[in-house]
Structure formats: C-alpha cells, structure tokens
Image (tube, helix red, strand yellow):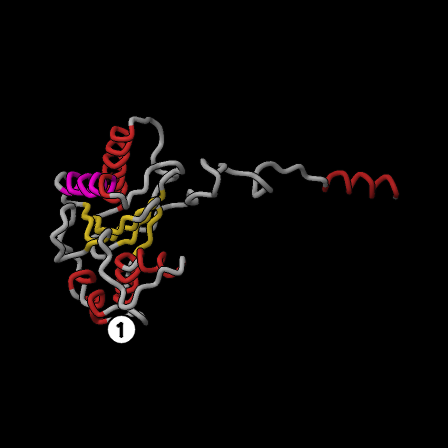
Amino acid sequence: MAKANARQQRELELRTWGGRRKNAGRKPKGERAGVAHLARPRVSGRVPLHVGLRLVRGLPDLQRRLWFRLVVQSCERAAARREDFRVTHYSVQGNHLHLIVEADDRQALSRGMQGLTIRIARAINRRAKRSGRVFADRFWSRVLATPREVRHAIAYVLGNSRKHAERMGLWITPPPRDPFSAGPGSDRPGLHEPRTWLLREGWTRAPAPRGMPAWMASA
C-alpha cells in the first residue's frame, strides 16, 4: 500500500515551464521601467488619443529655444506628410512630450508616431553631434472616448507646465499661457485642425476640470 501511494505521489509531480515567474520578461532599456509591451488599444478615426514620449537622460532641455524649435519643426514636417495621422495639441517639457492626436487606425498611429519620433531624434542628434537613442522607450497612448476624457486631456496637455511649476513651488496666479504648448487656433506650426467631433465640439459639452484657467477652458 505504501509503494502504491509513493508511486501516485511521484506521478503528480508535474514539471512546468514558462508562465509568470519572478524577474521574468523583457527588462527596461534604461534606469526606470518603461511602457509595458501590451497590445495597443483599438484605434478608430472617430476618437482622439493622448500620447506621451519620454527622452533618455543626458539630453538638452527641450524648453530651451533652440531645442524647442527643433521639436516644433519636426512636428510640422511630419504633419505635412500624412493625412491619416494628425497632431492637434502638444506640450513640450524639459524631458518629455505630451500630444493629442487623431489617427485613422492603429497602423496610422504606429506609422505616424514612428515618423514623428524619427524626425525629432535625427534633428536632436544632428544638432547635439551625437548618436544613439533619443527616446527612452516606445510611446504610450490612451484612447479618449468621451467628452469628459477629451476635456481633461486637453487641460492636462495645455496645463502641463503649470502642473510641474506647482509641484516645484513656482505657482503663479493667475497662471499664464504655456509658451511650450499649443492647440487649435494657435499660430504655432506643426498642428492639424481636428476632424473628430470630440475634439471639434464634443469636449465643450463636458464640465471644465476644477481650477482650469478661463483661457484654457475655451482652448
């Protein structure tokens, strides 16, 4: 009887491979974890997206005039090449970018962002006389499916400098327009007029986020 029990226990000792294990999977490219390599959200030409990009350490501050101009010019050139991918808002921070974009489908989003990041990276590397990666990881994106989500995203992107200034104790009242961001109606190059209902009109039907400046509420 004891031999039968021992044999049954040995048969239940199943060796498994793979699965979720501690420290398994692709490691971050840099010092911090990057964007998870999950399937991109479903993209439709009817809804915009909030997109973000972070630079690697050691690059110039993008809010310095020369580098800011390079980013904006790259946006302008990328905008002239595609009709299925459109940048409608941007915010250029010292080491990261926020964009609101429209894309006809997932492929248009991927190719549009690829073209844009390549142009920005080449411009920065050429001017800085360096080579290598410029962006720390691939871009992250979030679909904005409701007027409320779009309005909050617009407030976040156009008020990104304000958020960082508040965090550093540099709060200014009333907050001025951010010279490093732009949206529809701006005379800045590199932007498309939005085509989706949510960005043209729908976002105005949602209540403004608390604390949003008057100029931003009608941006």
How far across and down, in percent of the image, does residue 52 sit? 32, 48
**Quadrant occupied by the N terminus:** top right
In the displayed image of the protein, which residue is found farthest to the right? 2
What residue do we see at 24% from left, 47% from top? 105
Q: What span is colored magenta in the figure?
A: 67-79
Q: Residue 173 in the image: x percent, y percent? A: 29, 68
**Which one is nearer the viewer's eye here, 89 or 18?**
89
Mark 1 = which residue?
A: 207
Location of residue 29 with respect to 103 vertically, above or below: above
Q: Main secondary structure of the magenta part?
A: helix
Quarter of the figure with residue 166: bottom left
Residue 128, given in percent of the width and then of the height, sits at 29, 30
Q: Tell me: residue 75, above or below residue 150.
A: above
Q: Amino acid at mark 1?
A: Pro
Q: Name which residue lies at 45% across and 35% down.
A: 29
55 sits left or right of 22 in the view: left
Q: Residue at position x 72%, y 40% from top?
A: 13
